[in-house]
Amino acid sequence: MSFFKRVLKKSRSEEEANQSIETQNMINGIVELTETSVKDVYVPRIDVVFIEEDTTLPNAIKIMEESGHSRFPVYKDTLDDIIGILYLKDLILYIYNLDDESSFNITDVIRKPYFVPESKKLDSLLREFKRLHVHIAIAVDEYGGVSGIVSMEDIIEEIVGDIQDEFDNEIEEIIKIDDKSWLCDARANIDDINEKLGLEIDTTDIETIGGYVFNQIGEIPVKFEKIDTPEMTIIITEVYGHKIKRVKLVKK
């Protein structure tokens, strides 16, 4: 009996230690956001796909198809003269209501650009994103030149993370538990989840289920935290430090 008591005591001590480490990691995560600047996470200018203001509709569609992106800065004369952001979903809706392709004008469909200094801290930018209901910003350097773009996804990546381990290649991203429950890797694509589970999760500006969850709670995630939607309940089942690792989806 004394053996089992010792094992139980050790198990409890390890559990308390793990909880303490997890809490400390979450605190560290908050500190990281306050210390990390836009420049540390943005997509640099050289890797950004831009679209010219006077581009044709066929060319805009071609650029989108070849790049695989969903948002594009639109410039007028030079890359430092950004006049708006073109969203793939906006363009699809625009095309649906367009009578004549020759009347296409990209300025009719772009959204107003949001500029931020590349030195801005991520915690501050995240608050502004949520307050202004925008999900992408143009980063500018100290001289006012465009240095890159930063999105909500880039910040979420700091929370969710691209965590990989030796077992990741062997585990499916979406695993069916029963007729109403699925276990999903935080990096699972929302479109794939919608298709596989017959859901209609809004994918506006968010690509992964982990990103969706973080966007809903708006703070450092906690294990077993729940999010209720008309379609389902989402439960955070695994957290690695301050990053979401896996979630459980339960259809209603």
Image: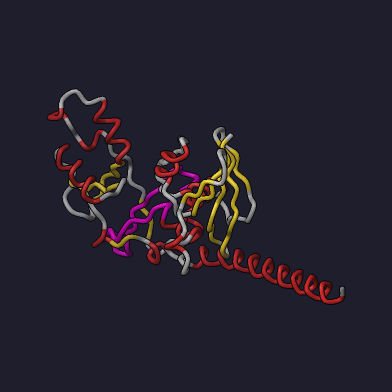
Give residue 37's quadrant in the image. bottom left
Q: Please name the residue shown 58% across and 58% down the image.
A: 238
Specify whether residue 30 is in view: no
Q: Please name the residue shown 51% across and 63% down the image.
A: 33
Q: Nearer the viewer, residue 232 or 98?
A: 232
Q: Is residue 235 left or right of residue 94?
A: right
In magenta segment, residue 135: yes
Note whether 33 is above or below 49 in the view shown.
Answer: below
Specify whether residue 131 is in view: yes
Residue 69 rendering spot, x and y as whole percentages: 29, 49
- Residue at the limit of the structure toward the front, as seen here: 1
Note whether 195 is above or below 13 in the view shown.
Answer: above
Q: Nearer the viewer, residue 189 or 26?
A: 189
Q: How many marks?
A: 0
Q: Nearer the viewer, residue 203 or 36?
A: 203
Residue 99 rendering spot, x and y as whole percentages: 19, 23
- Residue at the limit of the structure toward the right, as seen here: 1
Give residue 102's quadrant in the image. top left
Residue 162 rendering spot, x and y as whole percentages: 44, 62
Q: Nearer the viewer, residue 207 or 74?
A: 207
Q: Is residue 190 left or right of residue 87?
A: right
Give residue 83's quadrant in the image. top left
Q: Please name the residue shown 68% across and 66% down the image.
A: 19
- Magenta range: 129-153
For the N terminus, which image quadrant?
bottom right
Q: Is residue 118 left or right of residue 161?
A: left
Residue 156 rendering spot, x and y as whole percentages: 47, 55
Note whether 234 is above or below 141 in the view shown.
Answer: above
